[in-house]
Amino acid sequence: MKSTDVWPAYQIVTPEIIARLTEISGTENVSLKNADLELHANDQGIQTAHCAEALVWATDTVQVSRVLALANQERIPVTAWGAGTSLEGNPIPLHGGILLSFERMTRILAVQADDFQVTVQPGLGYKDLNHHLARHGLFFAPDPGANATIGGMLGNNAAGIRTVKYGATRDNVLKLELVLADGRVIQTGSRSVKQSSGYDLTHLMIGSEGTLGLVTAATLKLAPVPVHISAAIASFESVTAAIEAVVGVRGSGLDPAALEYLDEITSDLISKNDGLNLPAKPTLLMEFHSTHAGSMQEILEIVRQICIESGAVQFFSTINQSERLKLWHARHHTMETIVRNHPGHKVTNSDVAVPISAYPELIKFIETCRSRYDVMAYAFGHAGDGNIHVLYVTGDDSAYQTAMQMNAEVVNQAIELDGTATGEHGIGMGKTQFMRKEHGAGLDVMFSLKRSLDPNWILNPGKIFPSNIIPA
Amino acid sequence: MKSTDVWPAYQIVTPEIIARLTEISGTENVSLKNADLELHANDQGIQTAHCAEALVWATDTVQVSRVLALANQERIPVTAWGAGTSLEGNPIPLHGGILLSFERMTRILAVQADDFQVTVQPGLGYKDLNHHLARHGLFFAPDPGANATIGGMLGNNAAGIRTVKYGATRDNVLKLELVLADGRVIQTGSRSVKQSSGYDLTHLMIGSEGTLGLVTAATLKLAPVPVHISAAIASFESVTAAIEAVVGVRGSGLDPAALEYLDEITSDLISKNDGLNLPAKPTLLMEFHSTHAGSMQEILEIVRQICIESGAVQFFSTINQSERLKLWHARHHTMETIVRNHPGHKVTNSDVAVPISAYPELIKFIETCRSRYDVMAYAFGHAGDGNIHVLYVTGDDSAYQTAMQMNAEVVNQAIELDGTATGEHGIGMGKTQFMRKEHGAGLDVMFSLKRSLDPNWILNPGKIFPSNIIPA
């Protein structure tokens, strides 16, 4: 028994267990090397690293099923791993046990182009998927940035810049094959776009961070690659004016493909860094997709009018590809730009989301906290979805602790504003302390579901649920 | 004890229970009258009617909570009722007990126009909601036809004609307040569009047909009312050609707001009935929404080209409102037209859905069955989503039994084609026998979740799950 003072009590990975894992997976897919374990001990966020006791590379569904059946029988924790691009410690094997990596399950199982669907294994990166799909004129729209795997995106309900038009991961999945904690393999959903047959297990699994079951195949919805793309950028005197423009653009039915907000200091930084000639003001960066060139100028003129009416002090739009890519390059590399401009500092990326109407209030709250705590923090994000990222820049541990105090205030404020502790990064280890406040008695329901599907609590323990919910 | 030979054993609604219900809800909200019970004994489908023992009209969340807590304690079934517009017996109180009607919870709690959201009580009809929202330039897009309530739409994950662009009910809900079987009240989701905080209880509840909890308030996503609308209609020599055009139109990125299929006999019937001058051929009826008039002619020209290239033998499009409404009137009233043209016959509306690429094969299968069984059946539906309705017209019980044999074959074939037994009507009583075939071991997972959230099985018993899954 590894620990008797916590519930549930897990077993350690003994040499006998290793022998059985090797028998299931083959020598080449099991590793006990420190180098391998350390490579899979933390993600791209700032949560404390922790090594698994054994690393197993999954290669097919049957093997995943056998590994889980064994782990469940022996009470060994199993944490799934995609690419480690998450930010809240979601795939850190906090209780040791087995790290089950999907890095070797990267196949495209079927491109169902006429159905606008693709079926893939979970270890495939979404950028690699889209590279392959380009020849079909199709793409998988959710775009979390780093080359996250499909499995990781499913685990966290990843989203991104284009979610305002195309939806999050949750909105683009039709069918899953998954393995339950006891090794049972089930299919959820179907390849039909419309489904109203029984409980929606697909959506229950999406965002459950590998705590209810592990996906071994997924059928995803695809969108046609847009033919004509334009960009627009507008600067405002106030956040309120900028958000009035956001509401105007969305209400116009123009269906923007991106609608991003940058605060003063962020727009100033990327303006200088990327040579964009932007004033240091609240800024909106937009993208529009269209099937026909003729309508694009018309769209951009409507957008210009909306921005000017909302009080824009500067407006620029373009259908020129290199100009557009220059703007978006600046946005896509904002995090790297911030890191590069603060050498020797730690950059912590937080994620909250609120109803759009509450965005100005949230931004003002962030600005007030920034002054009060005297913390360096950039704020930018997906305004069209009410999603904001605060990037805290800290030079030492004391500054970091102060920043995290401020972040807790920001998260609580987002929840108060009828929003959420996380729009797209998930709960992982980093946000479990906000679950009760956000979900109230709903957290007990989540707990009931978890116990029902994983009674031995072997799947990714220490995530989503605050430790104090676990019965003594 | 009402019955000892089935599980679970329910109690009858005794005079003492009636007294307690009256104490909770007030005399005016409890009825034992036969006339009231019979009005709530069946829906618009063909499942056998069954009366509840008592009818209670819900008026607020606290009352719903108290009624459920009482029913759970006393082991009395509770079946929720919206407008009774469902088609598979979904709200029929099959085991008696309490029929909890939401007909008196019809308030709009908040219009959050800047957030493109509205929060409503579940008894509100979606047409009534949209009538109210028109002044805000917004609408709730799912359109199941009859004036279904929001609660009923949530229960069945209702969809409709515009789902191809705007999604089903599932895709347009952000937050729910609901009462669990034991009377606990929880909130699921948030008013943030992006959410990745814990398990997706919202989507677990949507489509669960009142078997996991009862919604008492819902925050819905709204879309801007389209400014410019056009319609197009095209006739083809074959289903395959028509579906090639469906794939072409969807792949073009034109984002149709409706993409409907009518088989030969349906298009012939509505052509004669509504004076449309359509040939008796596979037909597509389309609608497009745009924010700017200029692009509409361009869209329609692209659509025309796609249809002609796919082999259309006739094509007509219009931006004229009265011409458009005439076309859509014919489609919206297809069911009534069929009923009116077959006086004295029973019309049974079935619903299956498949991936679009399997649509031609499914239609051909339906045509083959129609000949083999010698059954009168119209086939039409939401081709853009792979969803087809088969309307069986039968003159006597023997013909009806034959038609239902054919329907079972059609449903099984849809499942074989990687589709589903129901795209939008739900399982209710009518399709429980297909659940094991469609979901395999996934059905056992649904059963586990049901037992976890409703251990006494009081919520809408007899629905979704086939009776043989219930332990003896």
Image (cartoon, coloured by chain):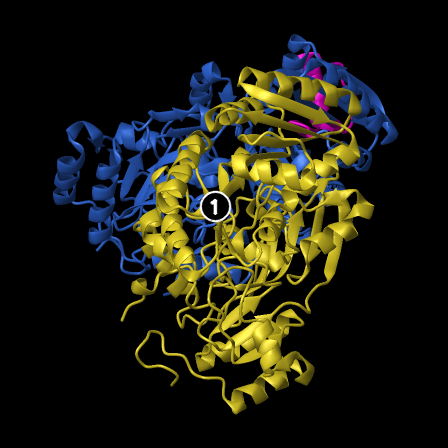
Chain colours: A yellow, B blue
Residue B82 falls in image quadrant: top left
Query: In the rendering, at what x and y percent does residue B130 appear?
Result: 47, 21
Residue beneath disc 1: A377
Q: Is residue B93 visible?
A: no
Residue B271 falls in image quadrant: top right
Residue B265 part of the magenta segment = yes
Query: In the rendering, at what x and y percent does residue B7 appear?
Result: 33, 60
The type of residue carrying mark 1 is Ala
Label 1: few (<14), some (14–19) or many (≥20) C-alpha neighbours in 10 Å: many
Q: Is residue A313 visible?
A: yes
Q: Residue at x 24, y 43 (%)?
A: B65
Left or right: where B69 falls relative to B198: left
Residue A471 falls in image quadrant: bottom left
The chain to which mark 1 is attached is A
Residue A188 part of the magenta segment = no
Left or right: where A43 falls relative to A420: right
| Helix, strand or loop status at disc 1 | strand
Is residue B28 placed above or below B439 in the rendered structure? above
Q: Residue at x 37, y 29 (%)?
A: B120
Is residue B224 placed above or below B152 in the rendered structure? above
Is residue B457 placed above or below A228 in the rendered structure? below
Query: In the rendering, at what x and y percent does residue A25 appear?
Result: 64, 80
Chain part drawn in magenta: B255-283
| Camera-side residue of B2 and A234 | A234
